[in-house]
Image (cartoon, rainbow, N blue to C red):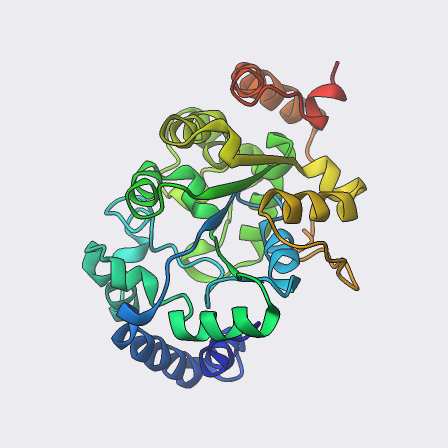
Amino acid sequence: MKSFLPELSNRYKYCRDRTQGYLGFVRFAASLERARLTAHQRVLPAAFLLGGMKCASTSLSTYLTMHPGCVGPILKETQYLSSIPGFFGDMANKGPFAKWMWHGWKFTVNGYKRFFPRAAQLQQASENLGRDILVVDTDPFNLYCGTAARRVKELVPNASFIVCLRDPVERAYSDYAMNRLFDGRLKEKRTFEQAVDDELSGNSKFIMHRYLFWSTYEPPLREWMTLFDRYRFLIVDFDDVCHSLPRVVQEMYHFLGLAPFRPRRFPLENRGRYESEISEKTVGRLREFFAPHDERLCELTGRTFGWMKSRA
């Protein structure tokens, strides 16, 4: 069940391997298109790992799908629920793959269901396991998109959600450092201080390079919590992921109603690589910027996070 579509899983690995280039990518796209043809036989997720971005979402997704009673999408970040014009700027409007992947921004239920297992496969796996199997979507872009929240409300009104939040200053710099490693459109060429200046002055146009936007959690989370009851959310502190990972994993399993299970290993995925440290001046500036957002976040979630305690 871990590879409910082994062919698709293999094709996705091709597209991630640069030595395979476009050939592997075309194979993956063709396999996903075949899945679209059987989308009416597939299921919707019952739970969502919402993010945030650079907040251990890849690691938490790994721990969830390690559980024998949980299966994720064929693509960790489908970006399909958030496929709306303008959300990713003009990045997703370029090239035939983008137009095919997002169907020209025309969201359809079957277009979304193609990323998940067939109902018959799920039923067979559930019988073999002796209990229901949970299907979970793992896309951190969804947290920031109100359209995604409304689509989930319509499709899965009784869904459960896991949200992991990180020190917004550290998250912003981690995001920046990752973009420094990219090539092409995503490549970040500015210094971190220049990126902060541009965003605060309204001159940062490309959304993937708006690091403060992705670190401002309260407004998008409030939109989700307006549509869904508070008890449907498990809010995870990134500090706990770093210092008490086994406990956090068990809390996720319990929250989702999964049977007790202990993974054999606890890998941390996508660790950041930093060229240099943030200057104290920039840290202080960002602390001041995020302070009112942090205050509203505490009011919304009813808790204090690790990065706030360290400043108290």
Q: Eyeballing the image, is 27 above or below 209?
A: below
Between 16 and 119, the one nearer to me in the picture: 119
Q: Quadrant of the C terminus?
A: top right
Q: Could you tell me residue 302's position as x and y percent?
A: 59, 19
Q: Could you tell me residue 93's position as x and y percent?
A: 25, 57
Between 157 and 148, the one nearer to me in the picture: 157
User: Seen in the image, is 265 located left or right of residue 147?
Assistant: right
Q: Eyeballing the image, is 223 above or below 181?
A: above
Can the viewer see residue 145? yes
For image coordinates 43% across by 26% down, the residue present is: 222
For image coordinates 45% across by 55% down, the residue present is: 186
Can the viewer see residue 94? no
Q: Eyeballing the image, is 1 above or below 221?
A: below
Between 242 and 19, the one nearer to me in the picture: 242
For image coordinates 49% across by 84% down, the residue present is: 20
Q: Eyeballing the image, is 238 above or below 6?
A: above
Q: Could you tell me residue 3's position as x and y percent?
A: 54, 75
User: Seen in the image, is 76 located left or right of residue 271?
Assistant: left
Q: Quadrant of the N terminus?
A: bottom right
For image coordinates 65% across by 45% down, the residue present is: 254
Quadrant in the picture for residue 105: bottom left
Q: Could you tell me residue 67's position as x and y percent?
A: 65, 61
Quadrant in the picture for residue 2: bottom right
User: Seen in the image, is 265 located left or right of residue 275?
Assistant: right
Q: How many marks?
A: 0
Quadrant in the picture for residue 239: top right
